Image (cartoon, rainbow, N blue to C red):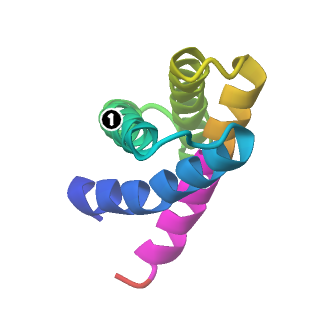
Amino acid sequence: MTQFIALLISLAIEIPIILLLIHFLQGFSSFLEFVGMFALACSTTLLTHSIAWTSNQIVILYLLSPVRIIIIEAIVICIEAFLYSQVLNLGWKKGFYLSLIANIASYCGGIIISHFI
């Protein structure tokens, strides 16, 4: 799978999940707030996906797959959790769970989709 395809899969899965969870956590007061949240979800995923992809390419020779994936995903979840908790003023627990749910879904979805392409 190429980085571009993996990025598209991540965006397609994570953004709707983030938007739905934020809607249930605090709602959107206006369309402008929805657009801002969409932009935040896109930029956060773009940032952390590039970190994850590059990190994987660097450590692929040194760590076995399960360990490598767990470490990289943990770093990604922490970065996203920090960004969501600070920008949205959610608190660290909600930011963490938001990122955790989106990333688990994205990772599992990517694995499933990769078997079909």
Residue 50 position within the rendered picture, expressed as x and y whole percent measured from the top left: 30, 36
Q: Residue furthest front?
A: 30
Residue in the foreground of this view, choosing between 20 and 59:
20
Q: Residue at x 41, y 62 (%)?
A: 12
> In which quadrant will I find the C terminus?
bottom left
Q: Main secondary structure of the magenta part?
A: helix
- Please tell me how many numbered marks the rendered image carries: 1
Q: Residue at x 45, y 75 (%)?
A: 113
Stretch of the chain drawn in magenta: 102-115
Q: Secondary structure at mark 1?
A: helix
Please state the horizontal and vertical placement of residue 44, each as a whole percent of the image: 40, 33
Q: Is residue 101 magenta?
A: no
Q: Is residue 60 visible?
A: no
Q: What residue is pinned by disc 1?
A: 43
* Residue 49 image offset from top left, x and y in percent: 37, 40
Quadrant in the picture for the N terminus: bottom left
Crowding near the residue tagged with mark 1, few <14, some 14–19, many ≥20 C-alpha atoms within 10 Å: few
Q: Which residue is drawn at the image coordinates 57% and 23% (left, top)?
A: 88
Left or right: where 37 falls relative to 3 = right
- Judge whether 75 appears above or below 43 on screen: above
Instruction: Tell me where residue 55 appears, x and y as whole percent.
Output: 37, 31
Q: Is residue 24 visible?
A: yes
Left or right side of 53 for 28: right
Q: Is residue 106 left or right of residue 58?
A: right
Quadrant housing residue 100: top right
27, 12: nearer the viewer:
27
Query: Which residue reaches farthest right?
Result: 93
Q: Amino acid at mark 1?
A: Ser
